[in-house]
Image: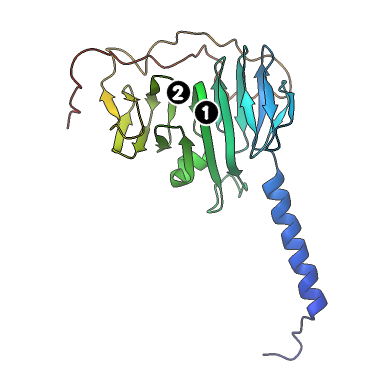
Amino acid sequence: MNGNWRISVPHLLFFAALIGLAAASAAGEPAAKLVFASGKPVIIDAKGAQRPAERGSDLSGGETLESRDGLVQLRFRDGASMSLQPQTQFRVDDYRFRDEAGKASPEDRSFFTLVRGGLRTVTGLIGKEKNEQYRMNTAVAVIGIRGTEYSGRFDDAGLSLSTFAGVVEVCNNAGCQLVRAGEHVSVPALNVLPIWRPGSQGSGGGTPSQALPGLPSGSVTDPKLPSQPIGEPPHPPQQGPNSPRPN
């Protein structure tokens, strides 16, 4: 090695500290910002402390957002958007995004949990470019995506999901089911294979049953965030045999 290239131990420690600070800063950045909130939603941190969830509030990894009697819209740092219905509990398990000239990086991830309630979401850069690094957990199934828009609801009846664009994969202990645009799936239990159903004629996932107000004006409003009325996904028919998936 060239004798002119020398790095002392103090220098190595200094550079290591800089790298550690940069990593900590990236990991500590908020995952999303609330761009709309009605009612009295709250954010609960990993220690159980609550704070009001208001327009402009940040949502970080390890935190749970409870919409309670309100409606909430989120904008994530990778460009993803999400709308939560009333009585919804949504948790950010692990979110990392390092914007590399408008591209997702191998370290990026979007790991969420729908504890209860309903949501609709549109994929951001992570879901589009690193879909293996996207995961929405529920108690009965795990939702993966391939660059998409979907809505899901989890309650006492299990998980019901509708795809509006792209493809969603729903997996649990019994197996996996692909759900393409206009199709639906229901999952009553962790050990029951996801039940696929075709969409109704002319349906792109169904007609919303509960409208979400348009976004308010202001600097934090993102024009790319869907502001059309949205609501819970339609529940698939409960009678009749399961429909076979067409080839």
Q: Quadrant of the N terminus?
A: bottom right
Q: Assign a secondary structure to mark 2.
A: strand
When the figure is inspected, residue 78 is found, relative to residue 152, above or below; the finding is below
| Amino acid type, mark 2 | Phe
Viewer-side residue, 10 vs 229: 10
The answer to whether 102 appears left or right of 132 in the picture is right
Residue marked by disc 1: 115
Image quadrant assignment for residue 168 = top left
What residue is shown at x 49% (from left), y 23% (from top)? Answer: 120
x%, y% of residue 156? 43, 19
x%, y% of residue 184? 32, 22
x%, y% of residue 243? 19, 22
Q: Earlier in the sequence, mark 2 or mark 1?
A: 1
Q: Quadrant of the C terminus?
A: top left
Viewer-side residue, 51 vs 167: 51
x%, y% of residue 160? 38, 22
Tell me the distance, in whole angstroms, between the alpha carbons under discs 2 and 1.
7 Å
Viewer-side residue, 217 vs 20: 20
| Amino acid type, mark 1 | Val
Dots 2, 1 in contact, CB < 8 A:
yes
Residue marked by disc 2: 154
Circle 2 packing at 10 Å, graded few (<14), some (14-19), many (20+), is: many
The answer to whether 205 appears left or right of 5 in the picture is left
What residue is shown at x 52% (from left), y 8% (from top)? Answer: 211
Image quadrant assignment for residue 38 = top right
Q: Is residue 194 visible?
A: yes
Q: Is residue 124 visible?
A: no
What residue is shown at x 62% (from left), y 48% (from top)? Answer: 98
Give the number of callouts.
Answer: 2
Residue 200 badge: none
Q: Assign a secondary structure to mark 1.
A: strand
The answer to whether 182 appears left or right of 77 in the picture is left
